[in-house]
Image (cartoon, rainbow, N blue to C red):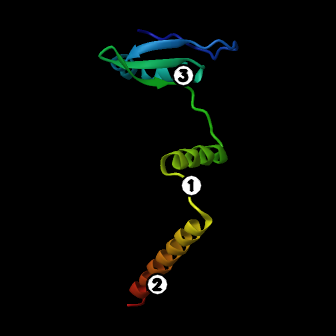
Amino acid sequence: MTLKLKNKSDNLITMKRTMTATEVARNFSEVLDAVEAGDEITITRGNKPVAVLGEAKAVPNSIALKAAMREHYKKYGFITQDEADEMIAQIRADRDADLSMEADFWKN
């Protein structure tokens, strides 16, 4: 399969393609050009889809954090404020102990 894409398209239509992993490897630069132009490529291995290659989209940290927290709460549930305070105190104590050991190490 040869990709012949010279310019970015100015239309809003994106192309979806399927390519084997071997085709992608052999034409990687052209594949990246196509993805940059807005195409989406499904990569297959043994006639099974294994990945979808599409344009990277920047996600603000706040949105990524919100999604991570939602997954965390879904998996582990919520904790009380007292539990959170205990965890924070333990983290700070561990950090202070590590800093103390590091300071002692550099003194000797």
- The answer to whether marks 1 and 3 mark residues whose Cβ atoms lie closer than 8 Å is no
Nearest the camera: 97 or 44?
Answer: 97
| Type of amino acid at the residue the image marks with label 3 | Val
Residue at 42% across / 83% down in the picture? 101
Identify whether 20 is placed above or below 76.
above
Side (left or right) of 24 relative to 58: left
Splitting the image into 4 quarters, where does residue 6 fall? top right
Instruction: Read off the residue under disc 3.
Output: 35
The answer for how far apart the CA atoms under marks 1 and 3 are is: 40 Å
Q: Nearer the viewer, mark 2 or mark 3?
A: 2
Which label's residue is closer to the chain start, 2 or 1?
1
- Label 2 neighbourhood size at 10 Å, few (<14), some (14-19), many (20+)? few
Nearest the camera: 11 or 90?
Answer: 90
> Please, which residue is most extreme toward the bottom here?
108
Which label's residue is closer to the chain start, 1 or 3?
3
Splitting the image into 4 quarters, where does residue 97 fall? bottom left
Callout 1: helix, strand or loop? loop
Residue at 70% across / 14% down in the picture? 10
The answer for how far apart the CA atoms under marks 2 and 3 are is: 51 Å
- The answer to whether marks 2 and 1 mark residues whose Cβ atoms lie closer than 8 Å is no
Instruction: Read off the residue under disc 2.
Output: 100
Instruction: Read off the residue under disc 1.
Output: 78
Residue 21 placed where, x, y %?
35, 20
